[in-house]
Amino acid sequence: MKILLTGGAGYIGSHVAAALMSSGHEIVCFDNLSNSDATVMDRLEAITDTAIPLVKGDIRDGDALRQVLNEYAVEAVIHFAGLKAVGESVAEPIKYYDNNVRGTLTLLEAMRDCGVKTLVFSSSATVYGEPQYLPLDENHPTSATNPYGRTKLMIEQMLADVAAADPEWRVAILRYFNPVGAHDSGLIGENPNGIPNNLMPFISRVAAGRLDELSVFGSDYDTPDGTGVRDYIHVVDLADGHVAALDAITRTDQALSTWNLGTGQGYSVLDMVEAFVRVNGVRIPYRIAPRRDGDVASCFASPERAERELGWKASRDLDAMCLSSWNFERLLAMRNAD
Ligand code: NAD
Ligand code: UDP
């Protein structure tokens, strides 16, 4: 298929681009580069042996979207473009509703206008709010505790309405748990601007000496070691899940499908630190800090529906996640030194 990846130059989008290429799809990336840079396309070319077109544009620009959809005869869209920092969304909610909600609405209009009705959307486990039971399955009630989460919920609701109104749509909502790790080549990975909010990039930068120590947010949760438990999923497994989901929605007669993409296995913050140190032979100084506002004690998926309906299952373990993150961080340091 010919597939448009909004936000295709970003962390998850670039890994999905690599996975789609190796499954024989043709792709075009559309990104305003607000949280990525165009050099990722060169590294993707080194991985896939193909030059992937990048159109620099904003998803709030309907004309630009219509142009790329028509010019490349796009058949399906995978929609990653969005802002994703929870703290920033609390401080600047208008920016988040504008970028994420208005951006998605503009994308849906452009898709409708061009007759492209196949869409995979990057949602998040954040839409489950405070877990009422674990593991979280797709029927767990949804709620949101911050503007970022509300944008994901609003978009999910928009997509459900669109799919209900026009049964020709084929929409997949993918609820990601905690994507970490990097491509085996070490050429693409997660490289956030500024100080990372997420655990794994923070750990990598402490290991690299770019940050002094990790703050472990809370050690008095009701979990085996008191630190927060999450379902970390290797980004290459996550990428394969997109290929499987796209394939599934082109065969189903259902207009809307929702799948968790997680492993079903929870690890604590200290489990992550221990694994990173053991696998990579590095030091990660850390101190226990107060809980972070809005964090839940434990969050992990039931990946059963995705296994059953997509024939997809995450296969890479925690060691592979830690190894590939560190490999990416070291190669990044070497590239930056050049
Ligand atoms: P990322 O920031 O690396 O990638 C997002 C890309 O979208 C960036 O390249 C950015 O430049 C682009 N972008 C942002 N706004 C845009 C706009 N208005 N127009 C065009 N391009 C725009 O983030 P990521 O980690 O790859 O996340 C991808 C998606 O997955 C996001 O929607 C995010 O909310 C969702 N998600 C991510 C995680 C995670 O932990 N990384 C977890 C759950 C869900
Ligand atoms: N965490 C931490 N220190 C950090 C960043 C995160 O202790 O510098 C913890 C956080 O409290 C949570 C887990 O690591 O228990 C995963 O956090 P992350 O921000 O990566 O993901 P999310 O909050 O979205 O699950």
Image: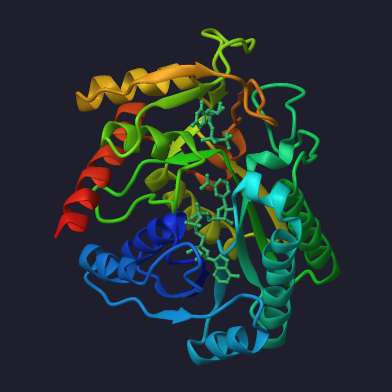
Q: Residue at x 75, y 43 (%)?
A: 146
Residue farthest left in this picture: 338
In the image: residue 266, left or right of residue 39: right
Determine whether 182 is above or below 69 in the image: above
Quick one: quadrant of the C terminus?
Answer: bottom left
Instruction: Count numbered badges in the picture.
Output: 0
Determine whether 199 is above or below 196 in the image: above
Determine whether 136 is above or below 53 in the image: above
Determine whether 114 is above or below 212 in the image: below
State the image coordinates of residue 282 (x, y, percent, origin top left).
Answer: 22, 25
In the image: residue 205, left or right of residue 115: left
In the image: residue 110, left or right of residue 289: right
Which colouring convention does the figure follow?
rainbow
Residue farthest front in this picture: 212
Residue 59 seen in this snapshot: yes
State the image coordinates of residue 217 (x, y, percent, origin top left).
Answer: 55, 23
Residue 185 seen in this snapshot: no
State the image coordinates of residue 103 (x, y, percent, origin top left).
Answer: 68, 71
State the image coordinates of residue 203 (x, y, percent, origin top left).
Answer: 37, 32
Q: Residue at x 55, y 78 (%)?
A: 75
Q: Residue at x 64, y 57 (%)?
A: 172
| Front one among 226 and 134 | 226
| Front one among 291 and 2 | 291
Q: Quadrant of residue 296?
A: top right
